[in-house]
Every structure is written in C-alpha cells, then in structure tokens.
Image (cartoon, rainbow, N blue to C red):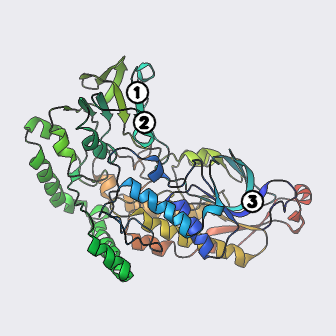
Amino acid sequence: MAEHEHGHGNEHVRVAVIGSGFGGLGAAVRLRREGITDFVVLERAGSVGGTWRDNSYPGCACDVPSHLYSFSFAPNPDWPRTFSGQQHIRAYLERVADVFRLRPHLRLNSEVKRMTWNKELLRWDIQTTGGDLSADVVVSATGPLSDPKIPDIPGLDSFPGRVFHSARWDHDYDLAGKRVAMVGTGASAIQIVPAIQPEVARLTLFQRTPPWVMPRVDRAISGVERSLHRALPVTTQLRRGLLWGIRELQVQAFTKRPDELGFVEQLAKRNMARAIKDPALRAKLTPDYRIGCKRILLSSTYYPALARDNVDVVAGGLSEIRGSTLVAADGTEAEVDAIVFGTGFHVTDMPIAERVVGADGRTLAESWKDGGMAALRGAAAAGFPNWMTIIGPNTGLGNSSMILMIESQLNYMADYLRQLNVLGGRVALDARQGAVDDWNRKVQERMKRTVWNTGGCTSWYLDANGRNTTVWPGTTTEFRRATRRVDLSEYQVLRAPATAATPSAARSADAPVEVEA
C-alpha cells in the first residue's frame, strides 16, 4: 500500500511491528517470507537486540542452550559455548537483521508514545518519537523483560553513591575496590555476583527469597563440532531436537505432578552443600518452597562466590536507606558505595499496554485492570482489532526456550494476515470477549495444579492479585497446535463501509459494520 494513500502526509504501512528483539525480528522475517514487504519495525533504541542489547551486565548469558535459543529458520552452527553469552546472542540478532534484509524496514530511535484504533478507517494511528504513521495491523513485540523495575525504597533518592539496574548497567563506573550492594537473587543477580565478587572490596547481597540453583553444565563447543554443524546442517537440527525433547518431557512434572520435583530438590541441595560449608549460610540459602515454583536458576559459580570472605548474605530484603547505610528488614546494616538492583521487570503489567487505545477509547491497561492480562491464544485482546502481541499473557515458559513460543505465535500471525487477505477489502478482526474468556478460563484451570501456583512461593509469574498471567501451563507442542490456525469463529469481522475509501467520506460515514464470521 503506497504512502500518503489516505490523503495526509503520514506514512501508512500494512503492518507495524513494535520492538526488535527476538519477537520483533522474528515477525519481520516471517512477514518477508509470507511475501509482505510493506511493514516497519519500530524500535525505541538505536540498535536491534531487545533484552540482549539492554542487558550487558558482567556475566550476562542465557540459561537455555544456544542451539535451542535460536530461530529454527536461522540455525547458527558457530555458537561458541553450549550456553552462549550476551554478546554472542546480540551478534546473532544483528546477523539475522542483515541476512534477512531487515535493515530497510527498521525505524530506530522511534519509541511508540501512543497508538489509537481508528474506527472509521479500520487502522492504527501511531505516534512515535521518530514521527507519526498508521498501520492496518500492529504486531507488538515489546517483550516482558524490557522495562526494569526498581522497588520504592525509603531514602533511595538521597543515597549519595551510584545506583543502577542490572538491565541498565553503568559501564563508566568502576566497581573495583568498592563496597557494593546487590539487591535481588534472580537470574541476573546470580550471574552478576560471581562476575563482580573478585574485584569488589565488599559485596552485600540483599536476599528476600533464596532461589533454587542447579549446576550449569556449560562448556566450549569444539572446533570439530562446529565444523560438523557447518558441513552437515542436519546435525544442528538433531542437537536442537534432542535439547527440545528433553524439556518437553520435563513439563509434566511442572504442570501436573509437582511432587515429582522432590528428586530435583535433592540435587539442588547437594549442589549447594558442595560449595557452602557454613551451616548458618546454608540455612539462609535454602528455599522453603517447592523447586520450580520460581524459575530454577543455573550456575556453578554462584554458591562458591557467596562462600568468599568479602561477601555477606543478608536474609532480610532491603527495607530502607539512610545516607550511605542500607538497612535490611531484619535490621542488618551495610555501608555501601554503589547499589545494583537485580529486581526484575514489569512483566504482569506490560508497560506498552498504557499506550494502546482500543475501539472503545480505553487503554489495554484499563481493560486488563480488573481481570488481569488475558489474550486469546496469547495474542489477541478483545476490543483491540488487528492488534497482536508476541510473548503475550500466559506464553512464558518455566523450563524451555521462548523462541519456540515466539515461532508458534508467528505461525498464528501469518495465518491472521492470510485470513485478512481472504476476507478482502478494508477489514479487521476483533477477538470476541467470550472467546478470550473461554481461552483464559481453560488456561487458569490448568494452572491450578502447576508448581507455579501450588509451590508455596510468590514469583514474578503472579500479578498483584495472585493470578498467574505469565506462564504457559503445557508443552510447547500443545501451544504450537493451539496457534497453528486462526479460528474465525473466535473473532468479529469488522468491515469499513464502502464509502470509507477516503478519509473525508469516512468521517461522515457510519461506524464500521460488524459481520458475523
């Protein structure tokens, strides 16, 4: 569709993709493979990579094996390690942007400020920091791990030292010889602690809840293996298939039989006992909830780092700051020069939701306020026509690669666009509230038995009302089946009246007609 078609100076595209991490770049590749070239990728930063661009903290790496944490359509025979580091994953995404010729579609430094559904013209009007445009379809791939969360701690504003979040690492500040507080014990913190422990004067770890930590079986991938993967691509596929299969088999324990995880707990305790000889420290680090309830973390260096002389573990979380003194909930005090927050992201309150204004004039955040995040097949929200999200509600995984879920959602996106083409003309699909409710009810019903809901912990998977709106309670195969096709009976088909061909006529025309599918 040509620019300026609607009689004003703003660019109009068939599809606007938001974000250029795995979800956004994956969507862009899929659009090209479907023969759609009239699209843009809106990215708020100056380069692609999403969470793998933002998280550049010391020790940053993926906890899913590289051969599984990559696109099936863009295998990389040259991963240097079984679990690759941030710089290798970021380089991989830059390469995907080059190989699949995505650069011309990228609009960097274009943060979406607001997008509003235009009922007359059946399109999205999008305001960005790089200019305004409109799109027939929006694919939102902003990702759950994109907006860092820093807790509201009394006295933080007046702390005289340096403060930053793990996802906004301050590389200009040298931690060597400093007294550093690490707040949080999640997936980032357990990578940061061993990376900075040798250089800091003192490291104080403020832990609210201890994580379960399993050994990380990481190794360099040999030149021989890499040559083999290059010469025989099928070997890369086999390796990926094996990694995937093992994880599919593990899902049952998380979703249906959490009692079976006791054996894994024993392994985790043994892992701790090997490195932590002090019984008091071991007691502090032993979780009181079932393994798997919070994300199981992988590290072979975290416990050994905590056993070092220059590390203190404070079991009470950080409760207030007085000058440069940090005070824990149990009254413990620590004098520090810098605070690093490894306190996670806005996951259950997707920040983009504040900026999406649907058919009834409400934002997505408002429509999710009471019932929590919910989307049909993890993709479509009622009242937000032709808007889809990648890694939407209840598509997260507790034990496997998110790339598998992203690719399933790309199948759904591709079929969604095919359906719009088949329907023809100016048309939009709006998920029926009943279909969204049905889907969500089934997901939440299955969630009841899972370790995430029964394991006795409070995790970032749960929203403010204790609902698990984050994780998928099944296998990646089941999700792939559920998202293979768009079922038109789950949608209302909206058509613009014939007179809405020009903006002036559309303004005087009636609202779009609803067509029963």
Q: Who comes first in sequence, dot 1 or dot 3?
A: 3
Query: Marks 3/2: CA distance?
Result: 40 Å
Q: Quadrant of residue 20?
A: bottom right
Name the disc covering residue 123, or none: 3
Q: Nearer the viewer, residue 86 or 330?
A: 86
The C terminus sits in image quarter: bottom right
Q: Who comes first in sequence, dot 2 or dot 1?
A: 1
Name the disc covering residue 162, or none: 1
Tag 3: Cα neighbours inside 10 Å, few (<14), some, or many (≥20)? many
Residue under the image location 62 percent in, 72 percent down: 32
Q: Who comes first in sequence, dot 3 or dot 2?
A: 3
Question: Looking at numbered disc 1 in the image, what kind of residue is underneath it?
Answer: Arg
Query: Marks 2/1: CA distance?
Result: 9 Å
SS for callout 1: strand
SS for callout 3: strand
The answer to whether residue 22 is left or right of residue 109 is left
Q: Nearer the viewer, mark 1 or mark 3?
A: 1
Report if the CB atoms under discs 2 and 1 are less than 8 Å apart: yes
Tag 2: Cα neighbours inside 10 Å, few (<14), some, or many (≥20)? some
Q: Position of residue 258 (x, y in %)?
A: 25, 60
The answer to whether residue 146 is left or right of residue 109 is left
Question: Looking at numbered disc 2 in the image, what kind of residue is underneath it?
Answer: Asp
Report if the CB atoms under discs 1 and 3 are less than 8 Å apart: no
Name the disc covering residue 170, or none: 2
Observer able to see residue 395 = no
Question: Looking at numbered disc 3 in the image, what kind of residue is underneath it?
Answer: Arg
Name the disc covering residue 35, or none: none
